[in-house]
Image: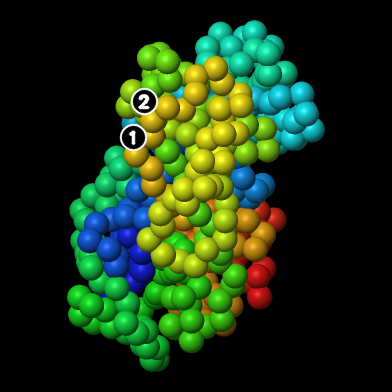
């Protein structure tokens, strides 16, 4: 019997495995053929610590030093732009994320495809960085394996049974026993809870789509910041010489292997085109992922109040990669009986009990 069974092999499951493997034996069960197949592998990951609910922001900030030490951060910058009619949304974004104001002329100098005749407001975070998601996830997996953790792919769950000693999981890859069950199943987190005969907590997946375009106007985009329409109505970001544009959609869906909706993608590209001089003439690739939130849009970390042997590590909602370092440390502190680094009020905002 293992000490910890972790369901889910995305960034949540991999980071949890790295931390918990220092406390005991670990098995990670992933239904797909590879780690990071769903949300973690489809993220336009950016380290922008001011993004998210207050407790999430605290975890983001507490993760920064470890992400830098791991060598997975590359300076990028993060700019919010707005037309005159979007002033209220712009000011809310700039205040919430503590952005530095830019003049429209300064913004256009940074991103020359912005339309000066439309752009009225701009602000930037110079500290925002790209995150090498695969390097981070694989680094956690390697650390876990060094401590003896086992990773089982193609291990979709078929049943969960509880007894006095722990949990029995029946999967397509065989049976697994563990003393503590960690639910890092992302969009499927509520389904895992129900399989374990526990009440769901309201984890809702939302679709987020992405289009890959050629570099607009033949520009070298490598030094441009990520740009976002005020109120998060679209965003764009350099990626390996290409240009990624998202409609920033957040449509509630059932857990599934997500794909983009053509109409949603087209509408988002139109919102983006209204702010730039270069039209979208070709989409070279498109995809979608799921961002899964609790009802209050804050991560859920810790034992379930109905059964403390069932532990939630879910509801990352698009901030799971940038918060993974501190979130997984918190998880290990809670399960290892250590005093968490995070203060009591923020801890209360993350516990599953707040949602019961």
Q: Position of residue 252 (x, y in %)?
A: 57, 61
Q: Point out which mark residue 284 bears.
A: 1
Q: Residue 231's image quarter? A: top right
Q: Residue 153's image quarter? A: bottom left
Q: Position of residue 95 (x, y in %)?
A: 73, 31
Q: Nearer the viewer, residue 29 or 330?
A: 29
Q: Residue furthest bottom?
A: 163
Query: Residue at (48%, 81%) from the top-left corner?
Result: 194
Q: Position of residue 185 (x, y in %)?
A: 41, 65
Label 2 to label 1: alpha-carbon separation: 7 Å
How many dots with numbers? 2
Q: Nearer the viewer, residue 245 or 2?
A: 245
Above or below for 233 versus 335: above
Are there few (<14), some (14-19), or many (20+) residues within 10 Å of tag 2? some
Determine whether the residue tagged by mark 2 lies in a helix, strand or loop.
loop
Above or below for 194 versus 62: below
Residue 59 located left or right of residue 94? left
Determine whether the residue tagged by mark 1 lies in a helix, strand or loop.
loop
Quadrant for the N terminus in the image: bottom left
Quadrant for the C terminus in the image: bottom right
User: Can residue 197 be spotted in the picture?
Assistant: yes
Residue contact between numbered discs 2 and 1, judged by CB atoms under 8 Å: yes
Q: Point out which mark residue 214 bears.
A: 2
Above or below for 284 versus 5: above
Above or below for 6 versus 211: below
Q: Point out which mark residue 251 bears.
A: none
Task: Indicate how the structure is coloured in the image.
Answer: rainbow
Are there few (<14), some (14-19), or many (20+) residues within 10 Å of tag 1? few
Q: Position of residue 314 (x, y in %)?
A: 49, 62
Residue 309 located left or right of residue 30? right
Mark 2 vs 1, N-terminal side: 2
Query: Residue at (76%, 24%) from the top-left corner?
Result: 84
């Amino acid at each position: 019997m293992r000490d910890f069974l972790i369901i889910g092999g995305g960034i949540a499951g991999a980071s949890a495995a790295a931390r918990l493997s220092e406390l005991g034996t670990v098995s990670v069960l992933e239904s797909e053929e590879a780690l990071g197949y769903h949300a973690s592998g489809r993220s336009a990951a950016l380290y922008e610590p001011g993004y998210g609910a207050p407790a999430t922001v605290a975890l983001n900030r507490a993760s920064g030093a470890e992400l830098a030490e791991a060598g997975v951060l590359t300076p990028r910058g993060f700019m919010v732009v707005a037309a005159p009619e979007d002033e209220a949304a712009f000011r809310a974004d700039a205040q919430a994320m503590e952005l530095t104001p830019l003049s429209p002329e300064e913004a256009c100098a940074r991103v020359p495809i912005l339309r000066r005749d439309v752009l009225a407001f701009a602000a930037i975070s110079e500290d925002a960085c790209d995150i090498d998601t695969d390097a981070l996830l694989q680094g956690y997996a390697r650390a876990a394996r060094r401590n003896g953790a086992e990773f089982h792919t193609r291990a979709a769950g078929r049943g969960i049974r509880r007894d006095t000693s722990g949990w029995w999981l029946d999967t397509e890859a065989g049976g697994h026993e563990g003393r503590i069950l960690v639910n890092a199943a992302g969009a499927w987190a509520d389904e895992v809870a129900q399989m374990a005969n526990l009440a769901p907590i309201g984890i809702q997946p939302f679709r987020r789509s992405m289009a890959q375009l050629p570099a607009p106007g033949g520009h070298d985009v490598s030094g441009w910041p990520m740009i976002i329409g005020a109120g998060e109505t679209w965003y764009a970001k350099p990626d390996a010489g290409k240009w990624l544009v998202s409609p920033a959609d957040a449509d509630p869906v059932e857990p599934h292997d997500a794909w983009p909706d053509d109409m949603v993608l087209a509408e988002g590209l139109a919102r983006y085109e209204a702010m730039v001089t270069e039209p979208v003439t070709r989409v070279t690739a498109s995809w979608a992922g799921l961002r899964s939130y609790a009802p209050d849009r804050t991560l859920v970390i810790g034992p379930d109040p109905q059964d403390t042997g069932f532990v939630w590590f879910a509801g990352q909602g698009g901030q799971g990669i940038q918060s993974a370092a501190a979130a997984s440390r918190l998880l290990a502190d809670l399960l290892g009986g250590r005093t968490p680094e995070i203060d009591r009020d923020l801890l209360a905002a993350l516990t599953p009990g707040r949602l019961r």
